[in-house]
Amino acid sequence: MQARRHFINVLFTAALAGSGLSAFAQHSMTLLNVSYDPTRELYVEVNAAFTKYWKAKTGQDVTIQQSHGGSGKQARSIIDGLDADVATLALAGDTDALHSNGGWIRKDWQKRLPLNSSPYTSTIVLVTRAGNPKNIKDWDDLIRPDVKVITPNPKTSGGARWNYLAAWEFAKRKYGSDDKAKAFVGKLYANVPVLDTGARGSSITFAQRGQGDVFISWENEAYLLEKEFGNKVDFVYPSLSILAEPAVTVVDKNVDKKGTRAVAQAYLEYLYTEEAQDIIGKHFYRPTSAKAQAKYAKQLPRLNLFTIGDAFGGWEQARKDHFADGASFDQIYAGSR
């Protein structure tokens, strides 16, 4: 019997070695998830669930640390040396920068996980003061002279870029041209009193500091504000918004240096499990599994959404046209001051 147990242990050790998991039973690991502002609460619960899942599967303890900020700033932090194992940023364009600025990830990173490496989606909504005293119903209301708008800076915040592009496409469809869309967005930014670096900063500016009449917000952030400040805020869905598809990746250079690739990859794959998808829906992100979608359909209604690819030719083209130095946002913002 003892010889049989020894033989099984040898086989198990060999199997672990073959899968890249050979050291799991001997020591714990720490992962750093570098993410964008509004995912704090989501990943607190995801991380707790994953550590239990991983311990049960491998016997190894894993600690997952979180870093949050404006998505563009977070990407720059990784490029500048922040030791991220995984990046779960607000937009694929920020993640692409990790490849083009130092080769931190592989060029084909978005093909390594299902659904272009986007385990959940979101969209952009309009948060108002309780009772909606300014009667804000759609994007048109954000250019009225009596309305002050809170939104973060598209140069540093991924969420802000979704906000900007949603407003642009609404105006382009309604008024018929990019020139008229540019004029519309210029009027909108003329109504913005302060540009925070990230979505959570803008959320604080609106809800806690009391600035502005409307906050252009991630859908999940709007629900969090309603939960925390229910007697102070409301929110409305505009007639048209954008399908936001945050994407995730391992940071290849770092995981290979640290020996954390297997657990980092498993962590991202876990986001597609039914357990994680349920957590995602619970935190007001839009899950991608049919089961979780059905469960959370009432709180996450079907909307009139367009994609970045359909409207702007993808993130690289949108970056060049709108967010690169001297592009449309810089032109608009300089003219709105």
Image: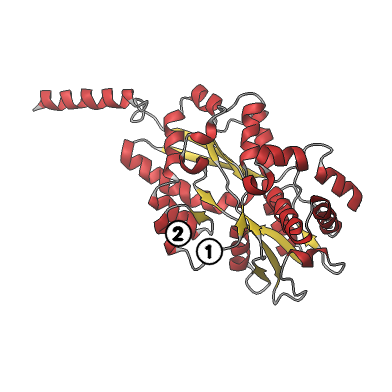
Q: According to the image, label 2 marks what residue?
A: 293
Please say if the residues under marks 2 and 1 sit with CB atoms less than 8 Å apart.
yes
Picture disc at residue 300: 1
* Residue 239 placement (x, y as % from top left): 66, 65
Amino acid identity at mark 1? Leu
Of 7 and 302, the residue lying toward us: 302
Q: Residue at x 84, y 67 (%)?
A: 144
Label 2 SS: helix
Mark closer to the chain start, 2 or 1: 2
Q: Is residue 18 left or right of residue 7?
A: right
The N terminus - image quarter: top left
Q: Is residue 98 left or right of residue 128?
A: left
Of 158 and 115, the residue lying toward us: 115
- Residue 211 in view (yes/no): no
Amino acid identity at mark 2? Gln
Q: Residue at x 43, y 62 (%)?
A: 294
Tell me where residue 203 sits by quadrant. Answer: bottom right
Give the alpha-carbon distance from disc 2 to disc 1, as whole Å: 8 Å
Q: Is residue 299 left or right of residue 266?
A: right
Q: Does residue 21 sit above or below 313 in this rendering?
A: above
* Residue 335 placement (x, y as % from top left): 91, 49
- Residue 21 in view (yes/no): yes
